[in-house]
Every structure is written in structure tokens, then in C-alpha cells.
Amino acid sequence: MADDSIIIGQSDKPEQLLLRLANRHGLVTGATGTGKTVTLQVLAEGLSNAGVPVFAADIKGDLSGVAMMGDAKDAFVKRAKEMGYQYQPDDFPVTFWDLFGQQGHPIRATVLEMGPLLMARLLELNDTQEGVLNIAFRIADEQQLPLIDMKDLRLLLNEMTKADGLKPVATQYGNVADATVGSILRQLLVLENQGADKFFGEPALQITDFMRTDRTGRGMINILAADKLMANPRLYATFLLWMLSELFEQLPEVGDPDKPKLVFFFDEAHLLFNNAPKALLEAVEQVVRLIRSKGVGIYFVTQNPLDVPDTVLAQLGNRVQHALRAFTPRDQRAVKAAATTFRQNPKINTEEAITQLGVGEALVSMLEGKGIPEMVSRTLIRPPSGRVGPVTPEERAGVIAASAMRGKYDTAVDSESAYEILSRRRGLQTPQPAPGQGAPGQVQPGQAPQQASTTGGLGGVLGGILGGIAGGGSSGGGRARMTITERVITNMASSAARTVGTQVGRAILRGVLGSLMK
């Protein structure tokens, strides 16, 4: 492999992905069993070797084997020899993640980081309900009620219905009907039933932990166990919105770097687009357009090119097409659509070739030169160096135990937040921490101290883009992270500066990026 490219396979010449164009996004498609996951693994291995961190949602668990030494199977050795190199098994640096904390390190974010505008879209609230949710976040901001987890938001909404609670404050911003609050609470229950109570909380993930390299300089391959997650589409959408937007917020503009800072692979993307709320589709479309200049590449892996919305498909320049079977009228349309999206090669009948490709073969067209797609070529995909297939539970446990992330996120921390503050006001008994959990504000032994965001994360950045000021939202300002106590003191001391920062920051973002999700 050249220093500036990744060898994908062999046609009449080596087919390669140029690292300086890898942030132009890509698409890997093909019917079940045609080798899409192997192609994904080849790309992930090549990027890792080039020092580029990778994040991949692993739907079936097949990608997890990249953490283990590959097997010199006869077919792999033969194919490598045909391509002019000697097959060399290898293993790769991997970190396993799991929103449920069962097959990897947990991933958490705070309600404050999500913000009211995106939360409203995830909950599919109407305009009236969205207005009430914005009022709730405004009250939390003004009264220093940190919104960390779902119980914070739920109790805050309940207090807005009580005359001796927050209702007098809430009505200063408009009518807050009990029925409207009840509807929001029911929608929150739907999200909670899909596991959002595990996602919202502390310690909140630092997005830079996805962007690490190992001691030898190879990029970390971050694998999200998504088998259970895909059965909970709202939670999956919540996570993706938060993750993509945190990246967009935190990473500086870099233009076209020599290689990406991070590459995302969304395996079985058809499940994502089929089940996701409209908010996610629109956000993904905008992020795909804009995040390239942050040095981040996004690659969708799916069965059918028609599964990806046209507005997203148009942004995907690097393409690998495995076999499609034209058994139904929709399949035939998919074959035709896939064929017409390639730069045609006079030596190949592209539409006919798509239905004739064998396992491990693909039509490949990568960006070359000044970002122009090369002519499509029928290509043998190179064999991956890591194991093809899933790890065993024992092997997964060993990788997790040896991870540099061990202990940083594994134990939930229930900091003092809106729930505890509001409970004390009413003289209610706050629940004691469960075994293994710290008392409010405490950090467990061996666990790195975590801090709350003052920016509102999504609410502070994409929240401003998605809906303007729209009744407030969480605080803006810099991206410093601090403890809950420090956040309260700082907010009280710099309310005016924070307000100015919020307005100026949102105005700049609206001016640069335009309005979104109208």
C-alpha cells in the first residue's frame, strides 16, 4: 500500500482509495452475502494502518473479528498472490462500545447537550409541544437546574403543571397546558422504553475518544455493538444526531487534509433510513454536506442504492457496488439506478455486470485527480488481514478489559442535578444510588472525573442552526467542560456575557450555514 492510498482490490490495475479524497464520503452496496462487510473491513484496516481512526456501527457483529489475528485461508492466500502480494495476517487496535453497556464501553450524553430543538424533533412534537419544551429548558437555564438525565427533564415538566411549583414561572413565557405537558411526557416514555435512560446521563462521552491512535500510530477502530440498537430506532437516531453534531461543533475547519481525521461507516444503512425520524434524515443530509471540511468522511453500507435518499447519495463520491439480484421490479430499478450513477467504462456493460458479480467481486469507482470519479472497473476485492467473522464473548471481554477506556465510562455517576434540586424544594426523598453507583457528584475509584457541558452540545450548536433562538435553549459560549458546581457558579457570575455569546454565536452559525430543518 502506498503512503497516500489504500489498496481496495485489483482490476486491470490496482484500485485504490486516495487518502486525501477519503473525506469526500462513499457508498458500499450489494445484496446480502455478496461481501459488503468484507469490503468495509478492508477499508477500515487500510485506514487504521494509515493512522486514521474509524467508527463503525456493527449490526451483525461480523466486523468485530478485525480485533483478532486473521487466518491464512487458502482462498485468501491465492487471491493475494493473484494480486501480486503475499498475504499477511494481522490484528488491529479496536475499542468496543455499546449504548447498553453490555458488549462494550457505555456511551452517554446529557439532556442538556441534546438541547430542546433536536429533542423536540426526536420526540416528533408539534409546534405547541415544542414551545413548552423550549420553556422548560429556559427555566432550567435561568434557575440553574442542570438537565443531565431523563428523570431531570421529567420532573421539571411535572413541576411546570403545579401552581405551587414552576407553573407561575412557565406562564410568563406563554400558556402551558397540563395536557400539552402530558403529551410530552408520554413521548418521553416511548424514548425511555427504547433505552434512552441508559444513553442520557454521566459521565458523558468526550467525542475525542473516538479519534485516538495506538502506540504504533495506527488509527483506533471503534466498533459500536448495534444489534440491539437497531431494534430501537429512536434511540439510534438520538445517538447519531448527538454524535455527528458534536463532531461538527468541536472540530475546526481544515479544508482538504492529507488524510481524514476520522471516518464513519454506517453498516446496514437501509435500516437507519427506513426507521429514522425525518429530523435524522435532514440532519444527516446537512452533516454529509458540511462535515467534509472538518476532515471527517462518512461511508454508508447498504443493500440497495435506492435505500439512500437522493440528496445524500449525490454527496457520495467513492463507490463500491457488489452484486444485485434483479428478481423484482424494484430490484430491476435498483440495478438500473446503480449502473447510471457510475462513470461509464466502454469496456464494461455496467448494468449487466452488476447482476453477474461473484462473491468478493465488485464494481469500483473511486475519486481521482481533482476529485473526478474514475471509470468504473470490475474488481477483485483484496482479502482482509484481520479475522473475517465475529469475536467470541471471551475474546470481546478480553479486548474490553485491556482497553485504554476501561474505567472511564463504565460506572454511571448520578450527579446532583434538576431532579435532586426540585425534590429538595418539595421535601421529597431522593433515591439512594444503586450498588456500584456513586453518590451525587462523586466519582468512582479508578474512574476519570467527568464534567458537564456548559454549551448545551447539540442545543448550543446545531440547536441554534436548526431553529434559531426559538425561545432560548441551553447556554451558548465556549466549549469548556466543568463540574456541575463550577457550572452553576460560572453561570451566575457571567449571565450577561453568556447571553451575548449565545446570540452572537447563533447569528454567526445561521449566517454561515443557513437555516436547517424548516
Image (spheres, grey):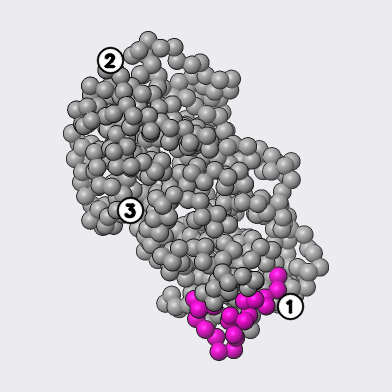
The reply to whether dot 3 and dot 1 touch (C-beta < 8 Å) is no
Counting residues from the N terminus, which is met first, the one under dot 1 or under dot 2?
1
**Label 3 vs label 1, nearer the camera:** 3
Q: Which mark is residue 517?
A: 3
At x 49%, y 56%, the residue is 273
Q: Is residue 230 left or right of residue 463?
A: right
Residue 423, placed above or below residue 276: above
Residue 117, how many percent across, how many down? 33, 42
Q: Amino acid at mark 2?
A: Asp
- Alpha-carbon distance for marks 1 and 2? 78 Å
The reply to whether dot 2 and dot 3 touch (C-beta < 8 Å) is no
**Label 1 vs label 2, nearer the camera:** 2
Residue 159, how many percent across, how many down? 33, 22
**Count of picture labels:** 3
Q: Amino acid at mark 1?
A: Glu
Label 1: which residue? 82
- Alpha-carbon distance for marks 3 and 1? 50 Å
Residue 332, how many percent across, how many down? 58, 74
The span picked out in magenta is: 339-359
Task: Judge whether residue 490 can be spotted in this image.
Answer: no
Residue 481, placed above or below residue 249: above
Q: Amino acid at mark 3?
A: Met
Counting residues from the N terminus, which is met first, the one under dot 2 or under dot 3?
2
Q: Which mark is residue 164?
A: 2
